[in-house]
Every structure is written in structure tokens, then in C-alpha cells.
Amino acid sequence: MAKDGSEEFRVVSPSIDNEGRLPRKYTGEGHFAAFGVDIDASDPDGPIVRWAHWVVINIPPPVKGLPEGVSGKEDEIGGEYAGIKEGNNDWKVPGWRGPVLPNHGHRFEFKLYALDAQLHLGNKVTKEKVVEEIEGHVLGEAVLMANF
């Protein structure tokens, strides 16, 4: 449940069960596609740094999900998705970039934050900027875990 007592929200994916395997087509071992449910993806088991694979901000409240393949579009997304912005992942490029790991057994955490305000971060959006900017504005969080 959100901190303000409102209805609970969740991160779900038609392609991944919570704690399930990350499908090959969403990794660096297949073609790149986004299954839009997330603000950032990182590897919680990484030895030193949690690596962000995707950063997305300003998902409008009525949006119940992002369509597969939405990541990396050159043109701005319109309609109900207007205003959504992809930030730079830890490869320093905008959009989703799937994992290419030397071995399997890694967990990926997709985290969605409900905020009380839209973020205004300029042209260069990074995970670090988002984490700093959302402090004091988080109404709730939801997580989806995937294994690779």
C-alpha cells in the first residue's frame, strides 16, 4: 500500500513472472526490446555496483504499462505516453539495454516509484539524478524481480 493509504500498485510484465527467468529476447543475447514497466533495472547481486539498464521518468498516472518495444524510439511518444522520458543507463546511452553477462545467476530488479510530482531534470537524465530528485516525493514503490 502506498504511504498515503491509497490503492496498492504493482510492477507486472506479460513477459516475466516475478522471480522468473528474464527472456532471452530482452538480453544482449537476443534483439533489444523493452517490456515497459520500469524506472530502472539493476543487478542486486553485482559485486561492486548496481548497474542500471533502464531509466524512465514522468510516466503519467493513468498509464498502466508501457508497450513492448517502446524503448529507444527517436521520436517522442505521443498520446497517453506523452511526457515520458528515457534517461541514460549505465552505458551512458538512453533506453533499455539488455544484460550481457559472463555467467548466469544474476537477479534483476525492476523498480517503479509513485511520486507526488513530475520530475524536471533537463536533457541529461541519469539514475543518480532521479534518486536525488525523488527524495521526499515517493508515495510508494513496487518491484518485479527477474533472473538471468
Image (cartoon, grey):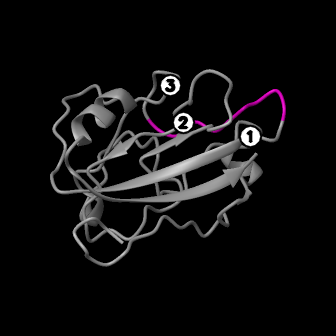
Displayed quadrant of residue 2: bottom left
Nearest the viewer among 3 and 122 is 3
- Regarding mark 2 in the picture, which secondary structure is present there? loop
The amino acid type, in three-letter code, at marker 1 is His
- Label number found at residue 53: 2
Write the start and end of the magenta stretch as one range: 95-103
Query: In this figure, which residue is indicated by the disc labeled 3?
Result: 90
State left or right for residue 40 relative to residue 131.
right
- Report if the CB atoms under discs 3 and 2 are less than 8 Å apart: yes
State the image coordinates of residue 110 (x, y, percent, origin top left): 53, 51
**Sequence-first tag of 3 and 2:** 2
For the point 42% across and 66% down, the residue is: 65
The relative height of residue 91 versus residue 33 in the rendered view (above or below) is: above
Q: Position of residue 86 (x, y in %)?
A: 36, 40
Label 3 vs label 1, nearer the camera:
1
Which circle's residue, 1 or 2, is located before the other in the chain? 2
